[in-house]
């Protein structure tokens, strides 16, 4: 059996003032094309389907249309869980209609999905936090333990967390109970979750820049060793870089976001994971690179001329620029830079002043005139740099 694992679509996400919707349409088409080309039997989407609790009409429409195409109009099951950016009730809402198209939407932890049957597959068993799928053309079932993002309130409500009980212990016991009951060696056994998970003893993986954090201290950090031994592959969402924090025999995989969504991800290649699975055998998987989406680039220059030259040579990018210079940028220089490129997200001026001594400004004479006070204040905030003529003119006009 072939399975496609993807996550962290963040449909509707913007980068500062820049919409990413056009890029998201292209990359959703690419994921559908990969699913069809690889002839996958099942699609898993591990949370952060939208970027916020109240997605736009365009984001919602793109989500539903993409799921319908992935499901081949009910021939191929698609299982999607909510992440920390999603409103669980919004994800659950279209479920009665979605299941007619073979789409299984799971918003809350420990959800109980009502069994149903379509022409090509059915949910043969269901329990809180678990479904089993049977396919007409396969002689074995697929079992999925599902855990959408769970904050403290949802955990107490749906997983019965005691106040003093650790999250790891709650999940360990919950997953073990399900796996022991349903996951024997006669089927494929999977876990999908939207959590911050790490391997014990491994370096801590940073959450994406601009991402709503899940890990607050160590209270919400989940260790990969709590995954039941029956699970052959764990499909994770939340971290935006592709990585396997498990083993080669039992992968625990973050499949990555489909686009670079912050400049901390600049230069990353994005992927989907294609899994090949059989009962009672080690799973193999390949990562397939996604090609759509504008590159995010962080660049530093020391002159306006070099900046403009590079920008004109790289028009189809989203850029964070740092410009190092001896003085602050003039208004006309800033205008020239922005006129040379339509994708400048941030322009960060950085004034070089190697001789600045903070002790020189430890005391400021408050009896001097207001313009001199402004100059001293500006120098104290900008490592000794004098304000340029433009700023002095603006300050004088304000006075």
Image (cartoon, rainbow, N blue to C red):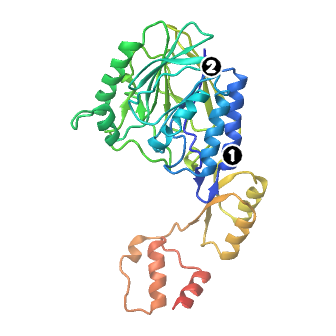
Residue drawn at point x = 55 percent, y = 19 percent: 117
Q: Name the residue under label 2.
A: 41
> At which x and y percent is residue 340?
75, 63
Residue drawn at point x = 35 percent, y = 80 percent: 363
Residue drawn at point x = 41 percent, y = 92 percent: 368
Depth order, front residue of 398/8: 8
| In the image, residue 393 above or below residue 354 | below
At numbered mark 2, what does the secondary structure look like: helix, strand or loop? loop
* Outermost residue, left side: 164
Label 2 neighbour load within 10 Å: few <14, some 14-19, many 20+: some
Q: Name the residue under label 1.
A: 23
Query: Which quadrant of the rendered structure holds the N terminus?
Result: top right
Label 1 neighbour load within 10 Å: few <14, some 14-19, many 20+: some
Q: Is residue 182 visible?
A: yes
| In the image, residue 385 above or below residue 117 | below
Figure quadrant of residue 381 = bottom left
* Label 2 with label 1: CB-CB less than 8 Å: no
Residue drawn at point x = 36 percent, y = 13 percent: 181
Q: Could you tell whether 285 is left or right of 206 in the image?
A: right
| In the image, residue 384 above or below residue 287 | below
Q: Which comes before the other along the chain, label 2 or label 1?
A: 1
Q: Which mark is residue 78?
A: none
> At which x and y percent is residue 277?
57, 14
Q: Is residue 266 visible?
A: no
> At which x and y percent is residue 273?
60, 26
Depth order, front residue of 377/290: 290
The Cα–Cα distance between marks 2 and 1, rounded to whole angstroms, is: 26 Å
């Amino acid at each position: 059996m072939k399975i496609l694992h993807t996550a962290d679509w963040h449909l509707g996400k913007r980068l500062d003032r820049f919409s990413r919707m056009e890029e998201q349409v292209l990359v959703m088409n690419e994921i559908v094309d990969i699913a069809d080309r690889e002839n996958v039997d099942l699609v898993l989407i591990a949370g952060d389907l939208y970027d916020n609790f109240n997605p736009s009409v365009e984001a919602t429409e793109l989500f539903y249309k993409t799921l319908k195409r992935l499901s081949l109009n009910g021939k191929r099951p698609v299982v999607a869980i909510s992440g920390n950016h999603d409103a669980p009730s919004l994800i659950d809402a279209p479920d009665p209609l979605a299941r007619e198209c073979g789409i299984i939407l799971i918003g809350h932890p420990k959800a109980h999905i009502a069994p149903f049957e379509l022409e090509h597959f059915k949910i043969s068993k269901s329990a809180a936090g678990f479904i089993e799928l049977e396919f007409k053309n396969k002689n074995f079932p697929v079992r999925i333990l599902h855990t959408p993002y769970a904050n403290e309130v949802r955990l107490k409500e749906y997983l019965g967390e005691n106040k003093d009980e650790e999250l790891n212990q709650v999940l360990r016991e919950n997953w073990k109970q399900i796996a022991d009951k349903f996951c024997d060696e006669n089927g494929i056994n999977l876990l999908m979750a939207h959590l911050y998970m790490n391997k014990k003893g491994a370096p801590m993986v940073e959450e994406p820049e601009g991402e709503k954090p899940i890990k607050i201290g160590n209270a919400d950090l989940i260790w990969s060793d709590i995954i039941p031994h029956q699970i052959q592959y764990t499909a994770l969402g939340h971290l935006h870089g592709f990585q396997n924090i498990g083993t080669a025999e039992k992968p625990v995989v973050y499949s990555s976001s489909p686009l670079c969504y912050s400049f901390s991800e600049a230069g990353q290649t994005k992927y989907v994971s294609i899994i090949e699975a059989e009962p009672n055998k080690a799973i193999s998987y390949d990562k397939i690179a996604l090609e759509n989406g504008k590159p995010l680039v962080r660049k530093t220059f020391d002159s306006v001329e070099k900046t403009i030259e590079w920008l004109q040579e790289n028009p189809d990018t989203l850029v964070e620029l740092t410009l190092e210079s001896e003085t602050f940028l003039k208004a006309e220089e800033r205008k020239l830079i922005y006129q040379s490129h339509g994708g400048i997200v941030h322009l960060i001026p950085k004034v070089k002043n190697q001789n600045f001594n903070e002790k020189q400004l430890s005391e400021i004479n408050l009896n001097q005139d207001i313009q001199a006070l402004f100059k001293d204040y500006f120098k104290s905030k900008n490592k000794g740099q004098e304000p340029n003529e433009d700023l002095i003119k603006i300050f004088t006009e304000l006075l």
